[in-house]
Image (cartoon, rainbow, N blue to C red):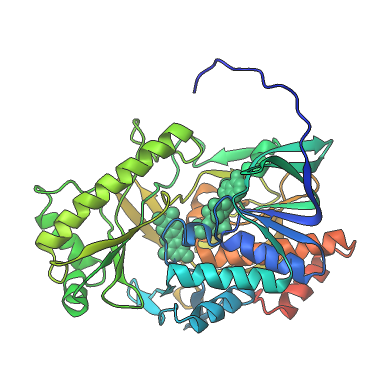
């Protein structure tokens, strides 16, 4: 970044809205937060920089819910309910939800979905809850009043506008609001290493049965890649290739995006993010060349969609009253201030591959998530939820999955409404979450 600057003239910014709760970012965390705050009976506005909800789940082309299922007493079962379950019901009603798929020798269970159905279901869920939506609104700054956020500044097609709110929930994934409000954040492991991003894509015209036999449960495709390694430039090992609801369409999670130093491309750096978009598409073209030529079932395959943006796994994480650690995930940690459960293992996207580490108790492979991981160490009227919440680098590699992000969002929205109504206590929050279907463990 240049050290040179220009001085901007001071300006008067129109106040677009005054609300009780402002949620910034409409991914899994943000949409769950907005639904829950609005159901708490307070005026809620959800702002989102794109024209649809879903975050990485739609814009990033993830097309798959992870972390909703985990083992309890030896049984694989749904551990994340509440708003997440209602969203899945709506996606299913639109014909866009796949049956559960097991993987990793039965240690994980996921649900893939259709992106368009997710977008439509999320709109309806948020609006039916009574929240307002403002799309194409990019949070670009805050105005502080001592230890409180007085207003969030948004860039829109109408120009710059301000929204005043009693409570703000940062669900931007990149901790943009917390960063603007000068709350301490850590990027990746603190030494410039974050989980590597990937550009997701979907592949059409796949011969499902032959492809399934060739890809196997990840190992077979690895062997094919190893055999072809001299002829193709693979960005990483650990290819994840899986069929969607229509089995002739597959999702591909195979790319890995680096910066010039070989570290994860930093999605909070404008130039690195831009270069990563180009590199992601280049890697996709190369991987398709491999699939068509080398993998049975993909001979006639076509790219059906490349995600609208690079899939970002990790950037800034906000310093909160509790930082969820990798050991807490692996050890199935329990907390008195539980707000719900994480059931996803550590999934580290490291240079050239993916490393998985599973909870030590295979029969109860989940951990509780504490309320304190949503409460920043500074700024009184701010909560944070989703992949930028209070987690250490390793803990985030697990609880960044959609399941835990829905849990955090539901808790943050519920808590913000209770705060606005002057009714917040930990016991009130936990009771309300249980009443609303959440499983606190
Ligand atoms: C390649 C990849 C594969 C993945 N695979 C899976 C998987 O199979 N299953 C699974 O469950 N999870 C998967 N994940 C993880 C999961 O998708 C994300 O961690 C999860 O979506 C995070 O939710 P979130 O709400 O915290 O943030 P995000 O989903 O990132 O949503 C943040 C939202 O905020 C908006 N936003 C950001 N900045 C601003 C701003 N300044 N102003 C306004 N709006 C803003 C964004 O547009 C976005 O809608 C994957 C992630 C990646 C990148």
Estimate the x, y position of residue 425 in percent, counting from the top left. 84, 64
Of residue 212 and residue 342, the one placed in the foreground of this image is: 212
Of residue 97 and residue 361, the one placed in the foreground of this image is: 97
Relative to residue 143, is residue 217 drawn left or right? Answer: left
Q: Is residue 396 above or below residue 68?
A: above
Estimate the x, y position of residue 384 in percent, counting from the top left. 67, 52
Residue 27 appears in the figure? yes
Q: Residue at x 79, y 36 (%)?
A: 144
Of residue 63 and residue 428, the one placed in the foreground of this image is: 63
View extreme (top): residue: 4
Q: Is residue 196 above or below residue 419?
A: above
Quadrant of the drawing holding the C terminus: bottom right
Of residue 226 and residue 63, the one placed in the foreground of this image is: 63
Relative to residue 163, is residue 347 drawn left or right? Answer: left
Estimate the x, y position of residue 259 in percent, counting from the top left. 36, 35
Q: Residue at x 84, y 59 (%)?
A: 419
View extreme (right): residue: 422
Q: Is residue 18 above or below residue 41?
A: above
Estimate the x, y position of residue 23 in percent, counting from the top left. 69, 55
Q: Residue at x 37, y 41 (%)?
A: 276
Residue 408 appears in the figure? no
Number of numbered discs overlaid on the protein picture: 0
Q: Residue at x 49, y 80 (%)?
A: 94
């Amino acid at each position: 970044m240049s050290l040179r600057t220009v001085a901007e003239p001071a300006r008067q910014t129109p106040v677009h809205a005054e609300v009780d709760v402002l949620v910034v970012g409409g991914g899994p965390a943000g949409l769950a937060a907005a639904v829950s705050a609005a159901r708490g009976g307070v005026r809620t506005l959800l702002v989102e920089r794109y024209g649809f909800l879903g975050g990485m789940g739609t814009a990033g082309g993830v097309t798959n819910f992870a972390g909703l299922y985990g083992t309890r007493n030896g049984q694989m079962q749904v551990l994340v309910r509440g708003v997440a379950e209602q969203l899945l019901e709506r996606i299913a009603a639109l014909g866009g939800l796949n049956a559960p798929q097991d993987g990793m020798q039965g240690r994980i269970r996921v649900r893939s979905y259709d992106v368009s159905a997710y977008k439509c279901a999320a709109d309806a869920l948020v609006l039916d809850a009574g929240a307002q939506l403002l799309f194409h609104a990019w949070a670009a700054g805050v105005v502080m009043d001592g230890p409180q956020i007085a207003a969030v500044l948004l860039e829109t097609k109408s120009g710059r506008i301000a929204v005043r709110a009693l409570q703000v929930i940062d669900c931007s994934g990149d901790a943009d609001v917390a960063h603007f409000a000068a709350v301490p954040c850590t990027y990746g492991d603190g030494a410039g290493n974050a989980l590597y991003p990937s550009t997701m894509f979907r592949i059409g015209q796949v011969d499902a049965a032959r492809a399934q036999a060739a890809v196997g449960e990840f190992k077979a495709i690895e062997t094919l890649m190893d055999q072809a390694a001299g002829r193709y430039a693979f960005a990483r090992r650990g290819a994840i290739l899986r069929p969607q609801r229509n089995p002739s369409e597959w999702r591909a999670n195979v790319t890995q995006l680096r910066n010039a130093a070989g570290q994860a491309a930093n999605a909070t750096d404008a130039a690195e993010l831009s270069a990563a978009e180009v590199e992601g598409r280049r890697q996709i073209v190369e991987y398709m060349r491999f699939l068509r030529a080398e993998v049975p079932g993909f001979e006639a395959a076509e790219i059906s969609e490349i995600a609208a943006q690079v899939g970002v796994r990790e950037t800034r994480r906000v310093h909160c009253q509790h930082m969820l650690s990798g050991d807490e995930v692996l050890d199935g940690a329990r907390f008195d201030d539980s707000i719900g459960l994480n059931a996803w293992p550590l999934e580290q996207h490291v240079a050239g591959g993916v490393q998985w580490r599973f909870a030590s108790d295979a029969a109860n492979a989940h951990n509780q998530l504490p309320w304190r991981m949503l409460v920043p160490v500074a700024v009184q009227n701010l909560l944070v939820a989703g992949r930028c919440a209070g987690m250490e680098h390793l803990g985030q590699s697990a609880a960044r999955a959609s399941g835990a992000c829905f849990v955090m969002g539901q808790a943050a929205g519920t808590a913000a409404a209770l705060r606005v109504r002057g009714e917040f206590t930990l016991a009130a929050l936990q009771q309300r979450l249980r009443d609303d279907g959440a499983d606190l463990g």
